[in-house]
Amino acid sequence: MAREIFIFWSGGFDSTFLVCKYHFEGNTVRPLYILNCDPRQNTQAELETVQRIASKLKLSPPLIFDAFNLTLDPDIIRESNFWFHRGVFTRPINQFGYMVQVGRNLQKRVVAGSVKEPEGFMHKLAPNNPQSVFNELAYPVLFHTKLELNRISLALGFADVLRETISCWFPVTVGGKYHPCGNCHMCRARLAFL
């Protein structure tokens, strides 16, 4: 039975994998994007990638939320700070807190594309803390690696779409199009499996 799935979509590999998987399963995908939740240099590249792939897949454009217009609930702030002071988060207020708030505002359980990575944290945090506000998000690929997702995408027939994603913190513009820098952590992780 088809479902309506709300997904935070950055235009990166993990979230695009989920968008494609749910879409090709016949579900209605509702993409979400949050502006200004992190000090990012890749926002424009992400948005252009999301819009290009959404058009290709005939998906509705993303609902865009501006973090400057979101007020985080006190429990989200409190728990974000708790994990920041224990070295789990690199910033006290980050994209995951805003994702939880958007889900609450929409009154929906929203999907986040967080995968298991050595430097990642959600696979350590979420399952071990069932009362965590961050468990208000769904993490369907939390215990998969990018390599596993790549294999699944090949088997399901949407690996070509994943090659159009951009997972780069410092994209460069060449000929009016964004390209990965090839040097940042995200680029190096991606080169390991594509």
Image (cartoon, rainbow, N blue to C red):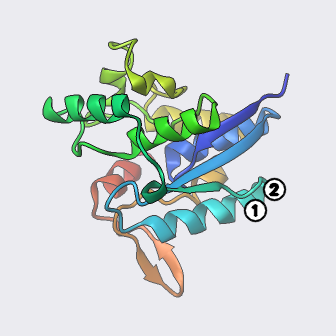
Kind of residue sitting beneath label 1: Ser
Q: Are marks 2 and 1 in contact (CB under 8 Å)?
A: yes
| Label 1 environment density (alpha carbons within 10 Å; few <14, some 14–19, many ≥20) | few
Say which residue appears at 49% left-offset and 74% top-offset: 178
Q: For mark 2, what is the residue?
A: 58
Q: In front here: 79 or 58?
A: 79
Q: Is residue 124 left or right of residue 59?
A: left
Say which residue appears at 39% left-offset and 13% top-offset: 131
- Name the disc covering residue 55, or none: 1
Q: Visible in this render: residue 158?
A: no
Q: Visible in this render: residue 170?
A: yes
Horizontal and vertical percent position of residue 175: 52, 87
The quadrant of the rendering that contains the N terminus is top right
Q: Is residue 28 left or right of residue 101?
A: right
Q: Secondary structure at mark 2?
A: loop
Q: In the rendered view, would you say 59 is above or below 46?
A: above
